Image (cartoon, rainbow, N blue to C red):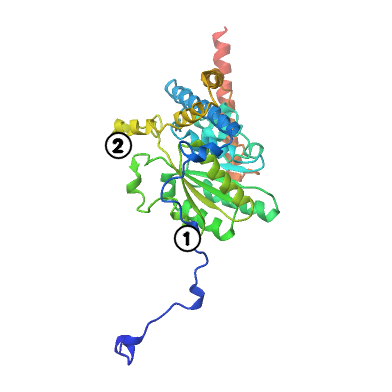
Amino acid sequence: MTVQELPGAAAYRPTPPPAWKPLTDPAPLLPDPEPYRVLGTDAAADADPELMLRLYAELVRGRRYNVQATALTKQGRLAVYPSSTGQEACEIAAALVLEERDWLFPSYRDTLAAVARGLDPVEALTLLRGDRHTGYDPREHRIAPLCTPLATQLPHAVGLAHAARLKGDDVVALAMVGDGGTSEGDFHEALNFAAVWRAPVVFLVQNNGFAISVPLAKQTAAPSFAHKAVGYGMPGRLVDGNDAAAMHEVLGEAVARARRGEGPTLVEAVTYRMDAHTNADDATRYRNDSDVEVWRAHDPVTLLERELTGRGLLDEGGIEEAREAAERMAAALRDRMNADPELDPMDLFTHVYAERTGQLREQAAGLRAELEAEQERHGEHGAEDGR
């Protein structure tokens, strides 16, 4: 006899047990229907003029940095460079909202954020040049290594933030990821852990339209990436990623919320990758030039410059001063990158483990023997040439 055949089965209406009650009211977690904006709206009048001018100077410098680094790849001085041209507002805002004690967890495209946080421009490119595992001390700068595997930096950010809170340290971690990285399991695991632990983490998704060649519509059917936050029990914020003032405000609020112990926030910045995925990519195979031109009209540098000049906060002299400072940075970067680095092959085994494993010791000994043998051969040839 089935349940349907039992007497009174038609009146049977099972209900979940009391423990099912939702833990969180979803309504306050939902993002706004449209990306939040400041520039070109009434909210711009309340923005701090000093902050706006600093954002502008950093945007101009960041744009020049992207252009110069891209040129270095064409000159053979960089193996690869994932440009963030068009996304500079996201990068700069992410760096400027953090306190010195906080941590930044960048992806491979977030070199500019690391530089804006104070990292030496050459050190930021060391990994992409292929010289070392990473070109800087993460602990010194509070910047995790530039992460090439997609989204693996996100659980690391959660772990660091959770550990800091357990120790009583007033630290916030800001983790950056592209829209493509949200399709990785690490993204979902990181958000779930962060929300359950109420870890002081801010997740910044830079939605630039394409995961290399895969358009957004083929990655997710969600209304937005910001909506994904609700499923994990954290607020989602949707913001115009080309609006530097809006980015700084939204990220600043998320960082302050995390520092107060109110848990993580997922911020989606709607932006666009103006250049190809990297110098090795041919973007014309999957998008039209006309699409790119539409976004050029929404350029983050132009948007902020127009706002500042319109309000009388920036004149031609100020624009030229920002450009000259950016040129000086680019010239110094170019000169230093054109100098051949002095590398020690034995550094391959440095900073892999705190204490080398037996396998690493064996490999290091083998390489050292090869290098010594090579040196002896060169020495013998030199002696023969001198006879």
State which mark lies toward you, 2 or 1: 1
Quadrant of res 104? top right
Please report the residue visible at 56 percent of the width from the left and 26 percent of the height from the top: 122
Q: In this view, does 192 lie above or below 117?
A: below
Q: Which of 135 and 228 is in front in this view?
A: 228
| 10 Å crowding of disc 2: few (<14), some (14-19), many (20+) | few
Whether residue 34 can be seen here: yes
Q: Which of 216 and 340 is in front in this view?
A: 216
Give coordinates of residue 267: x percent, y percent: 49, 47
Give the residue number, with chain letter if any, for mark 2: 286
Lateral position of residue 171 relative to residue 254, left or right: right
- Dot 2: what SS? loop
| 10 Å crowding of disc 1: few (<14), some (14-19), many (20+) | few
Give the residue number, with chain letter if any, for mark 1: 27
Please report the residue visible at 41 percent of the width from the left and 47 percent of the height from the top: 34
The amino acid type of the residue labelled 1 equals: Ala
Q: Residue furthest right?
A: 168
Quarter of the picture holding the N terminus: bottom left
Q: Which of marks 2 and 1 is nearer the N terminus?
A: 1
The amino acid type of the residue labelled 2 equals: Tyr
Q: Residue furthest top?
A: 387
Q: In this view, does 56 lie above or below 336?
A: below
Lateral position of residue 147 relative to residue 357, left or right: left
